[in-house]
Amino acid sequence: MSPRTVVVLLPLGLDTPYSYLAPEGMALAPGDLVHVPLGTKSVVGCVWPRAGAEKPVDAGKLKAVKARLDYAPLPPELLKLIDWMADYTLAPRGMVLRMALRHGESPGAARERVGVRLAGPVPGRMTAARARLIEFLGDGFVRGKTEAAREAGVSPSVVDGLIDDGTLETVVLPPEPAAYPPDPDHAVPTLSEAQGTAAEALKEAVKAHGFGVYLLDGVTGSGKTEVYFEAVAQTIRAGRQALILLPEIALTQAFLDRFTLRFGVRPAEWHSGVSTRRRAKVLNEVASGDVKVVAGARSALFLPFRDLGLLIVDEEHDPAYKQEDGVAYHARDMAVVRARLAGAPIILASATPSIETEVNARRGRYKRLALPVRFGGAKVPGLSPIDLRKDGPPRGRWIAPRLEAEINDTLEAGGQALLFLNRRGYAPLTLCRSCGHRMRCPSCTAWLVEHRYRRRLTCHHCGYQAPVPEECPSCHAKDSLVPVGPGVERLQEEVQALFPAARSLVLSSDLLGGVERMRAELDAVAKGEVDVVVGTQLVAKGHNFPGLALVGVVDADVGLGHGDPRAAERTFQLVHQVAGRAGRGKSEGRGFIQTHMPEHPVMRALVTGDRDAFYDTEIAAREEAHLPPFGRMAGLIVSASEGHAAEAHARRLVAAAPMVPEVRILGPAEAPLAILRGRHRWRLLVRSPRNFDLSRYLREWRAVAPKVTGNVKVAIDVDPQSFF
Ligand SMILES: Nc1ncnc2c1ncn2[C@@H]1O[C@H](COP(=O)(O)OP(=O)(O)OP(=O)(O)O)[C@@H](O)[C@H]1O
Ligand SMILES: [Zn+2]
């Protein structure tokens, strides 16, 4: 009898699983997590399905699986997703597996929870606090110790005293679940007619339990969340699980609150801010099926759901869904793949769908559910252009007189104003007045950005930081360095000068205090405790600020004109979303965009509010240029510490590319961000028609490509979003 073997995929930069001996009596199935020897080390791996025609292995040389881990196995659906993603993105399968295993090491024993209940006689010594506690526990039920003290409004020592006296007895409680079961009928809202129609369609889709993609296409403030919550409720009623992906989970306190209002409890959260212990718990209970709803960042896609019945990608257009480092993948697209593998419906929600999604909806591959008006009848704010060529502010200032006057009126009427500028820090460039020297990052092709609150010059690409020097590093002139251009911090200075009585606040992702502070500040804005908010793209993300009456886009041209094929789309989405924060409460909202090119199609579409016109033009332009989704594209970045090594390898790569009439290779050219973290970058763009298997072509190319030498690296990005 030949010994039993299994194949095990390791979470390393490897594409193929290794064979191991399965010890006598150890039952192993695909998806099981195991400890296996690798060289002199022991690593965690996952038993993988056999691919079929495997080479016979010489069992004499094989090492044996050491142990089967007491973790939930990865379900077959997840194994398929990993295979699919590895095939599509060309990332080593082991690296994709690694994303599914990144839930920390063994969580350790759960902390014991102690509960109390009324058991013995009334104590000899009675106090008001003791009486309150005894009354509270009078129903005879068990309560957690801390909970009992808190609810009865007594200090924990009162509880301990009554335990000592024998009035209360302690009970060991079962561990707390990762999330309590949401109640689908906790607070069912009254939906508007359009909301009701959309919700019905989604509920039917959940009941039918088949794959289908739904675009929940609703204007800002139309109540998309309320609608997809109905689909979530239906999923819970059916006993299945739902996954809600959010672009910036750490900031979505408001989302969690709304979920709690609707379902009575919070969903299980999954993102990098959740502790390892808690993550392990969530993971186990997602696998057992006990956790019904997960709200998470893109990594939640790799959770081992037992019975996934619904996926939702909120703000599906958001670029945060694209992971650029490591395995380059788009979480929205992979969510659609996962839904297909699960045979479940998926909802993509947005007021400004990505071009890809819009095209799929127009072609009928995705079903569009439209919410054309705001909930409660408020109007989506109109946008007026301010032509910076004619009506711009005086030199050294960034708020045009017209915008200043409008802000003034808004503040006088008791409303809030939001100024949007997608530039972090104080000034994007620091320059020497005497010699013209520009402060650059020592390891990137980038200017250093001054952050005045931190008193630092910072590289936004690699994180390099240095204090602002007292003299010019080039000509040594003293006090000659001057900031050029505005960042949000500088804009706030102008706000303070123009409106000294107004309470202003900068909202940006890089301020000290992290997520906690940001949550508190967003909350303060929503409560009306701030008059003028100055913010980066952070403020464009689905926030509900009821008192916000005016939005000013300080420089609408920032993102345009870098040769980035997605620039128009990004600008449209950002400005439209930012403007959509205004006028959600009682007062009507207004928006202003400062631009040097009011005649640009993007600006025109924003001003006329003609969203369809924007999509028509942009879709036609993409089709004309065979850009995604009308053609397929991949980016290759060849990098090395020496520029000539990167360039030479890029040229050899192109020379080795298989000749196929469908494929066009552009480049090599030096990347716009020519040096990053000290590495020189050359890029290639590979394009093919839409119905061509570009991933397969890239794999074949890679198989015949010259081997990399020295420290040369080749990074492949299928469906690139960034062109730097
Ligand atoms: N049926 C409803 N009953 C009560 N309140 C509702 C209802 N629908 C929406 N709302 C309220 O309307 C506001 C806007 O809803 P929501 O934030 O879901 O809009 P949205 O479509 O997600 O907007 P955006 O795209 O700007 O994020 C919220 O305060 C929400 O609580
Ligand atoms: Zn840098």
Image (tube, helix red, strand yellow):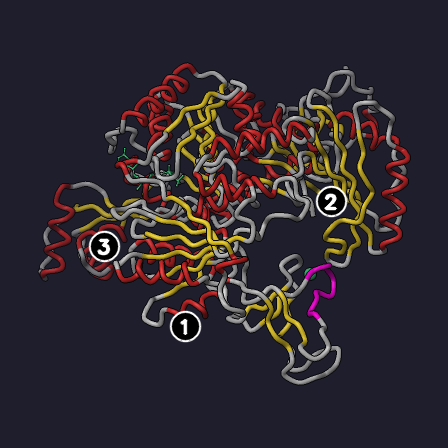
Regarding residue 621, the answer to whether it shows in the image is yes
Residue at screen point 58% across, 41% down: 568
Residue at screen point 30% across, 61% down: 411
Residue 535 locus on image (x, y percent): 46, 57
- Mark 2 or mark 1, earlier in chain: 2
Mark 1 or 3, which is nearer the eye? Answer: 1
Q: Which class describes the residues within 10 Å of circle 1: few (<14), some (14-19), or many (20+)?
A: few
- The amino acid sitting under disc 2 is Lys
Q: Is residue 405 magenta?
A: no
Residue at screen point 50% across, 33% down: 353
Q: Which class describes the residues within 10 Å of circle 3: few (<14), some (14-19), or many (20+)?
A: few
* Residue under pointer 3: 150
Query: Residue 497's mark?
Result: 1
Q: In which quarter of the image is residue 261?
A: top left
Q: Which class describes the residues within 10 Å of circle 2: few (<14), some (14-19), or many (20+)?
A: few
Label 1 to label 3: alpha-carbon separation: 47 Å
Span of residues in magenta: 438-446
Labels 2 and 1 touching (C-beta < 8 A): no
Regarding residue 31, the answer to whether it shows in the image is no
Query: Residue 41's mark?
Result: 2
Kindly state the secondary structure of the residue where label 2 is placed: strand
- The amino acid sitting under disc 1 is Ala
Q: Does the magenta stretch include residue 439?
A: yes
Residue 89 locus on image (x, y percent): 69, 33
Kindly state the secondary structure of the residue where label 3 is placed: helix
Residue at screen point 47% across, 38% down: 315
Decide which of 639, 31 is in the foreground and name it. Answer: 639
Q: State the quadrant of the N terminus.
A: top right
Kindly state the secondary structure of the residue where label 1 is placed: helix
Query: Residue 83's mark?
Result: none
Q: Quadrant of ligand 1?
A: top left
Name the side, left or right, on which 383 lies relative to 58. left
